[in-house]
Amino acid sequence: MSRYFSLMLCAPAVVLMACSFESKPDDAFLDSSMILRPGVDDAGVTVRKYVDMLESRSQTDGTPVKVTRWERTDAGYTLYLKFSVPVELPFIWSKQEKLSLLQYANVDGELIPAMQFFMIGMRAPIHPSKADKVETARPTSAASPPTPTSSATVTQAPTAGTATSGAPSATQAEMDAESEGVPSDPAPAATPAPTLQTKPQAHAAPAATRQATAVPTLCSSDETPVFACSTGKKRASLCMTGSNQLAYRLAPLGGAPEMVYPANTASTAFKPGTHTSSNGQTLPFMSFDKGNYRYAVYGTTTTMQGLLVEKNGKRIANLNCQEDRLSEMGTAWFQRLYLGLDRDKRALQLP
């Protein structure tokens, strides 16, 4: 471990790179061991393999992540990427110790801790053309932020939800029925639905953002609840897998999901957005379109929270969360995860 201490000394001092120029990286740098925190051997990969891993990931437009250039600096090298948005990765390189410290990630002007960005990259979708060349890197530290990467952040559009196979999608009439106070009969599931989970939220979030209260959700044990609440008659959940895919589920209290989106492994189109309510509250939301209908879950645990359904831009149901509610949508780690997604700029048609 003593070989990591030299980088512990220089890391705080090098905040701004005073001098840099475009340059092809030295092989010794590319083959050096990469670390994410001073003094800790935590990445378990060389710089070369890490860059190869990044280039194997997909951007939101379906093309592979692209290395645009390298710059030589006083401290080492800075890598410039196109990862849906511009990304800068400054490295401090100790040639003698054969170590390279990734200081942080500058994601379109926002600084993200190195460990967090490392995880975002690991969880990003692999481009089909690179699938047979991928070597998976794994950090050796358990103290990792969102188990994504990410994006933040900078990460990719979630491609497919992990909804329970065979669970039928609800008809719009079922949503309309609840908005009028008439309970709808749950559609029978062809295969077992996810069991109701009660656990501290959320296992993929940083410890600082975890919500201490256990809240029942429709998420499976290997998913992170992003949004969950009871509307009185129904329970809704937005769940995230380790690969940052989202799935929306709606079920009668105590029943199996009667609406699941997506209903299979097809591509999805969840979009993040922000709405300012009539009382001035800022409400983050996540929406998806299904034909002429738009569905949105909105709010945080410190604001109003609910489910909205619109048809052709007009509200047809607004179900307010009443109890057992949680929302990670306002947290920094969740917003960074979906930084690369197209945003839903339409206002919510709330009362």
Image (cartoon, rainbow, N blue to C red):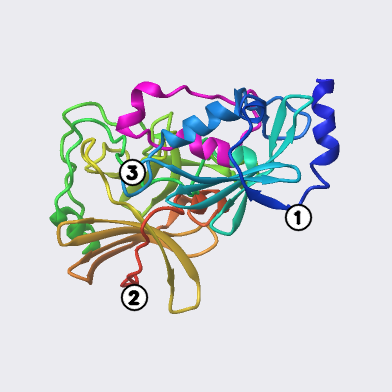
Specify the quadrant of the image occupied by residue 266: top left
What percent of the width, then of the height, locates residue 275? 42, 70
| Discs 2, 1 touching: Cβ within 8 Å | no
Rate crowding at label 2 as few (under 14), some (14 to 19) or many (20 or more) other CA atoms within 10 Å. Answer: few
C-alpha gap between disc 2 and disc 1: 53 Å
Q: How many marks?
A: 3
Circle 1 — which element?
Answer: loop
Between 107 and 198, the one lying in front of the other is 107
Whether residue 198 is visible here, answered yes or no, is no
In the image, taking residue 1 as reference, residue 262 lies left or right, namely: left
Specify the quadrant of the image occupied by residue 285: bottom left
What percent of the width, then of the height, locates residue 309? 25, 62
Give the residues drawn in magenta, as a range.
117-144
Residue at position x 76%, y 51% from top?
A: 15
Q: Which residue is mark 1?
A: 18
What percent of the width, then of the height, locates residue 297? 36, 57
Rate crowding at label 3 as few (under 14), some (14 to 19) or many (20 or more) other CA atoms within 10 Å. Answer: some
The quarter in which the C terminus is drawn is: bottom left
Residue at position x 80%, y 20% from top?
A: 1
Q: Which residue is mark 3?
A: 63
Q: Amino acid at mark 3?
A: Thr
**Label annotation for residue 351:** 2
What percent of the width, then of the height, locates residue 197? 42, 33
Circle 3 — which element?
Answer: loop
Q: Amino acid at mark 1?
A: Ala
C-alpha gap between disc 1 and disc 3: 33 Å
